[in-house]
Image (cartoon, helix red, strand yellow):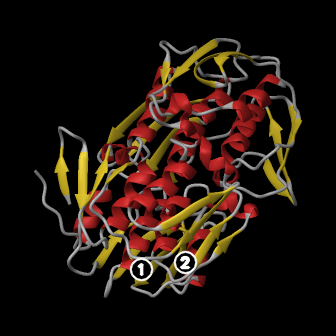
């Protein structure tokens, strides 16, 4: 691995198998939600194993901007909650950096307050649409000023929001969480209809905190205007981040690694199931429980992978995993097909086009047909410059693929990895990754 800080370029190569064990990086989705829910609890929450990444710090700083005291003692974070009605008008404009999750959760959190909030972020975040959240909140009387639903945007909340029912046009865990956060401050019973289930960390945390929320079939039912008390929260490991190491071990000959303390949530394990169906030697051991989420350790051994197909209905469970699954497909035997990927065009970049173009650069046959991506497995040639376009998951995915390329691959704008997985390079090193820094 070669770093050039001036040019923001990194190169990977690998001569030896990956061996050893690491603890999974703390879960990003749960870290965001733990901070947000702790901020409106009554009392002080101790959060253990919070992810210390740029995206999480965006949420943390935004809460401080709203009058919430968040501080660190030793390795733990403490949040002095202000109750569901206690947030203050922001002292300054709210900078969410690269974090779409921060933006959408905060929009839901602040929608029931009458003050104005101005949100902005970096260049990548400002290119992403927030139409689904804005339209949902506009239906509740919240007023926005924006350009094509993108940040920067101004939101004027509505402190007279009442209970409501909502059914989204497409599945989105962030939209669902924004609706739940609004409903907490809305008197009466609100209902969110979810035909296709999405990750349920917000619901699991609220149930753990004894908030009156329940799930019945495809309905999430929230009782509004209810106070709740703080409880300590332990954040488990992130399966989405762990997948980069998992795929690396599967495709690098003679590798065998163990990753510990991974969140074992059914809505997050679809990619693991796919890799196992591809022939991946992945063993789940040591199942345990951190009260609101199960955790497991995973043992991964190098495997010969075969092609696979995903359906459009899988999208909600794989939204963050398509880049690294594309790498697995590139190293498999046969043609893999990913169906229904329109939603990838509104991530940190146009992920669908970026995945296809960069695979082609590396000598892998990839083609977009409608909203589908077809990848024929082969041998990555290397000797090219990959532009991750400020997308952390693209940077990590193509970094992993380049570890088995014939020639050195350079990855541009790799520094965005710290938005979600600041320990990525340390973990690669612990497992025997070869690199030289300059």
Residue at 31% x, 73% y is 404
- Residue sticking out furthest to the left: 438
Q: Is residue 235 left or right of residue 138?
A: left
Disc 1/disc 2 C-alpha distance (Å): 9 Å
Identify the residue at horizontal 56%, vertical 81% (top origin): 334
Q: Is residue 84 above or below residue 400?
A: above
Q: Is residue 415 left or right of residue 157?
A: left
Q: Nearer the viewer, residue 359 or 321?
A: 359
Residue 191 sits above or below residue 161 on the image: below
Q: Is residue 167 left or right of residue 257?
A: right
Q: Is residue 124 visible?
A: yes
Q: Position of residue 372 (x, y in %)?
A: 67, 60
Residue 236 x, y percent position in the rendering: 49, 61
Answer whether labels 1 and 2 touch (C-beta < 8 Å). Answer: yes
- Look at 47% across and 71% down and name the residue there: 330
Q: Is residue 396 left or right of residue 262?
A: left
SS category of the residue bearing label 2: helix
Q: Which residue is mark 1?
A: 250
Find disc 2 in the rendering and name its residue: 275
């Amino acid at each position: 691995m070669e770093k050039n800080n001036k040019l923001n370029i990194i190169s990977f190569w690998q001569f030896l198998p990956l061996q050893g064990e690491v603890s999974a990086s703390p879960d990003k989705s749960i870290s965001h939600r733990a901070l947000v829910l702790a901020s409106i609890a009554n009392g002080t929450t101790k959060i253990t194993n919070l992810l210390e990444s740029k995206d999480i710090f965006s949420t943390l700083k935004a809460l401080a901007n709203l009058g919430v005291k968040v501080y660190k003692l030793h390795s733990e974070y403490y949040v002095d909650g202000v109750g569901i009605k206690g947030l203050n008008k922001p002292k300054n404009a709210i900078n969410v950096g690269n974090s779409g999750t921060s933006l959408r959760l905060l929009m839901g959190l602040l929608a029931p307050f009458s003050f104005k909030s101005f949100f902005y972020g970096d260049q990548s975040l400002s290119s992403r649409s927030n139409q689904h959240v804005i339209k949902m909140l506009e239906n509740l009387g919240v007023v926005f000023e924006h350009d094509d639903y993108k940040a920067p945007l101004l939101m004027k909340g509505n402190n007279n929001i009442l209970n409501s029912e909502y059914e989204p046009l497409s599945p989105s865990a962030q939209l669902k969480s924004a609706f739940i956060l609004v409903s907490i401050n809305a008197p009466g019973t609100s209902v969110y209809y979810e035909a296709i289930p999405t990750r349920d960390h917000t619901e699991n945390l609220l149930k753990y905190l004894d908030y009156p929320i329940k799930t019945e079939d495809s309905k999430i039912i929230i009782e509004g205007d209810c106070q709740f008390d703080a409880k300590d929260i332990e954040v488990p490991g992130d399966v989405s981040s762990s997948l980069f190491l998992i795929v690396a071990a599967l495709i690098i000959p003679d590798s065998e690694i163990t990753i510990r303390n991974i969140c074992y949530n059914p809505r997050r394990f679809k990619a693991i199931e796919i890799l196992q169906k591809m022939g991946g030697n992945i063993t789940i051991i040591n199942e345990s429980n951190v009260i609101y989420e199960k955790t497991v350790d995973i043992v991964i051994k190098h495997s010969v992978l075969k092609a696979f197909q995903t359906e459009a209905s899988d999208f909600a469970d794989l939204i963050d995993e398509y880049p690294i699954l594309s790498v697995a497909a590139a190293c498999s035997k046969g043609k893999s097909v990913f169906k229904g990927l329109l939603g990838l065009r509104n991530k940190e970049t146009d992920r669908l086009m970026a995945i296809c173009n960069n695979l082609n650069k590396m000598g892998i046959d990839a083609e977009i047909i409608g909203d589908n991506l077809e990848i024929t497995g082969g041998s990555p040639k290397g000797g090219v410059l990959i532009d991750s376009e400020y997308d952390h998951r693209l940077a990590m995915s193509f970094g992993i693929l380049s570890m088995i390329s014939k020639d050195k691959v350079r990855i541009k704008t790799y520094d965005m990895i710290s938005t979600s997985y600041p320990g990525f390079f340390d973990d690669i090193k612990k497992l025997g990754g070869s690199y030289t820094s300059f």
